[in-house]
Image (spheres, rainbow, N blue to C red):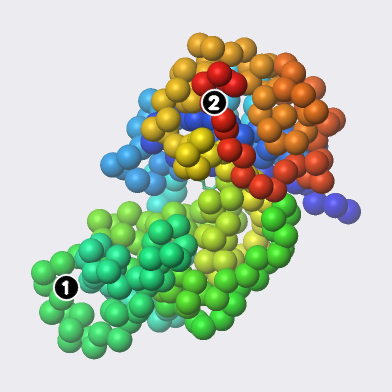
Amino acid sequence: MSQTVRGRFAPSPSGRMHLGNLFSALLAWLSVRSAGGIMVLRIEDLDPDRCREEYAVQLADDLRWLGLDWDEGYQAGGPHAPYRQSQRTASYAAAFHTLQERGLIYPCFCTRAERLAASAPHLGQGQGAYGGKCRSLTPRQREELSACRHPSWRLQVPDQTAAFQDGLQGAYAENLLRGCGDFILRRSDGVYAYQLAVVCDDADMEITQVVRGRDLLSSTPRQLYLYQLLGRKAPQFCHVPLLLSEDGRRLSKRDGDLDMGALRERCTPQALLGRLAYLAGLLPLPEPVSAAELIPLFSWEQVRKEDVTLSDTSDAF
Ligand code: GLU
């Protein structure tokens, strides 16, 4: 008997959604709906400094405007509530303590500047592999340093390659030690890190399929290692192309002309969906279409793998 597909969209409410977020959301939604699965909307509001409730309300409204609905999650409830990371700390704390009891976590007293200086610049998303400076501190050194600074907490990783088959990008592998190094599970201000939270949430919510932007491909080996340590079942991953501006930058919430506020003024939902589906490789022409009409047209074989550079962005959308 085949398992019901459970997918999710997991936006961070740190600004208005932009075209790149929509592109990932549309593909995640189509993948679930074309398989008759369950769609979950989880709000990734881990970072209290960057996230705001009004953005969460707004993004739910923007998704509905596009016709991208969800069965469980924010504003809908469901068996795995709560669906906001800020309310799921108990799950992250339990996982953290499990790993801590096994001696796999250590405090790191490096400042941000030290971390950046010590890391190879080209690795990961500009964050580089951590050289492990604080791994070998003695208990006494830890005690002394704790007196002047709150540490962040790192997971010790082995010199081991994590490999997986991405549903869209194909085979991907990274050596944990050289690719990312010991990574942070909890920040010095006590906030649990995305890498830990996303694994706990996807496992707790029984997510079977993660569709998200290609910028998170390099996070996946770390997440798979956490699944392994925590004895949880990992989902399948599909990392979709990024939308890039003409100068090759990834679209971000700073590209105001392509955020949902501006797009909703200029476009109908059908026009926007038609363009996105065309860019994804699902339509031969950028013609208006509804979300529901796209469901039978969806297949992963059709979806392009390479990032999309938008030329003359404001005209096209
Ligand atoms: N919250 C992340 C973002 O908005 C997505 C994380 C994920 O899909 O794993 O970029």
Compared to residue 301, the image places residue 71 above or below, namely: above
- In the image, 50 versus 180, the foreground residue is 180
Tell me the residue at 68%/51% (across/down). Answer: 238
Element assignment for label 2: loop
- In the image, 80 versus 243, the foreground residue is 243
Mark 1 CB lies closer than 8 A to ligand 1: no
Compared to residue 150, the image places residue 260 above or below, namely: above
Residue projecting furthest to the right: 1
Q: Is residue 74 left or right of residue 38?
A: left
Q: Which residue is mark 1?
A: 146
Tell me the residue at 20%/80% (across/down). Answer: 142
Residue 196, image x, y percentages: 46, 60
- The numbered disc on residue 242 is none
Tell me the residue at 47%/78% (across/down). Answer: 177
Frontmost of labels 1 and 2 is 2
Q: Is residue 2 left or right of residue 200?
A: right
Q: Which residue is mark 2?
A: 312
Residue 306, image x, y percentages: 66, 47
Question: Does label 1 or label 2 sit earlier along the sequence?
Answer: 1
Residue 78, image x, y percentages: 60, 37
Other residues around mark 2 within 10 Å, as few (<14) / some (14–19) / many (≥20): few
Q: Is residue 253 left or right of residue 77?
A: left
Amino acid type assigned to the residue bearing label 2 in the image = Asp
The answer to whether one can see residue 185 in this image is no
The answer to whether one can see residue 142 in this image is yes
Amino acid type assigned to the residue bearing label 1 in the image = Ser
* Cα distance between the residues tagged 1 and 2: 52 Å
